Amino acid sequence: MDRPTVAVGCLIVSDNKVLLVKRKNPPNEGLWAIPGGKVEYGETIEDALKREIKEETGLEIAVGELISVVQIIAEGYHYVILDFECKPVGGILSAASDASAAEYIPFNKLKEIKTTKTTYEMLERYIKGEKPPYIITQISK
């Protein structure tokens, strides 16, 4: 890969719970994360968010403000992920696509599940009330 891959993520919070999906495929297989995925060629950020969230959770969303920019750099792997706060506006919650589960997890239960490092850092900062957008970098070579 000679250029970073652009991806999007969707933060949906309701009643001190966050919508997370359990990843079904590598590289984060078995870990919980906010739903999202790659932006396809010719697709807008907003359209990518709506498509990915519908594919993974069955929900239709309204896209809100930018909440974080995540940079993940490893050997042969470079992602730049734009995470947005979103609101569900339709659909029925059900895991699909590359998600084996989709659930609203209470904030006070986040330490009991295995999340991706970047999801955990973003949620920790969000829960503490830090002003977004957050810049989150994970480098492992």
Image (tube, helix red, strand yellow):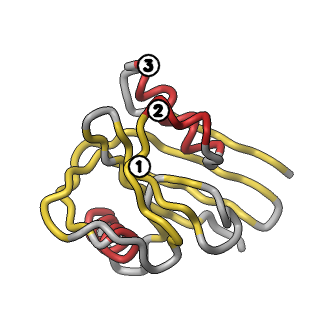
Type of amino acid at the residue the image marks with label 3: Lys
Q: Which residue is mark 2?
A: 134
Q: Which mark is residue 128?
A: 3
- Classed neighbour count for the residue bearing mark 3: other residues with Cα under 10 Å, few (<14), some (14–19), many (≥20): few
Q: What percent of the width, then of the height, locates residue 141?
A: 86, 52
Q: Is residue 85 left or right of residue 25?
A: left
Q: Depth check: 19 or 68 in front?
A: 19
Q: Earlier in the sequence, mark 1 or mark 3?
A: 1
Calculate the distance from the C-alpha at mark 2 to the C-alpha at mark 3. Answer: 12 Å
Q: Residues within 10 Å of mark 2 (few under 14, many from 20)?
A: some
Residue with the mark numbered 1:
83
Q: Amino acid at mark 1?
A: Asp
- Residue positioned 48% across, 66% down in the render: 101
Residue at the spot x=47%, y=29% of the render?
108
Q: In terms of secondary structure, where does tag 1 sit? A: strand
Q: Amino acid at mark 2?
A: Tyr
Residue 55 placement: quadrant: bottom left
Q: Rounded to the nearest whole Å, what is the CA distance between mark 2 and mark 1?
A: 9 Å
Proximity of marks 2 and 1: CB atoms separated by less than 8 Å: no
Q: State if disc 3 and disc 2 touch (CB < 8 Å).
A: no
Q: Nearer the viewer, mark 2 or mark 3?
A: 3
In the orientation shown, which residue stands out farthest toward the right?
141
Badge 1 density bin: few <14, some 14–19, many ≥20, Cα 10 Å: many
From the viewer's perspective, is residue 123 above or below residue 9? above
Q: Where, quadrant-wise, is the N terminus in this rendering?
A: bottom right
Whole-percent x and y of residue 30? 66, 63
- Image-based side of 70 in relation to 40, left or right: right
Badge 2 marks a residue whose secondary structure is strand
Q: Position of residue 62 (x, y in %)?
A: 17, 57
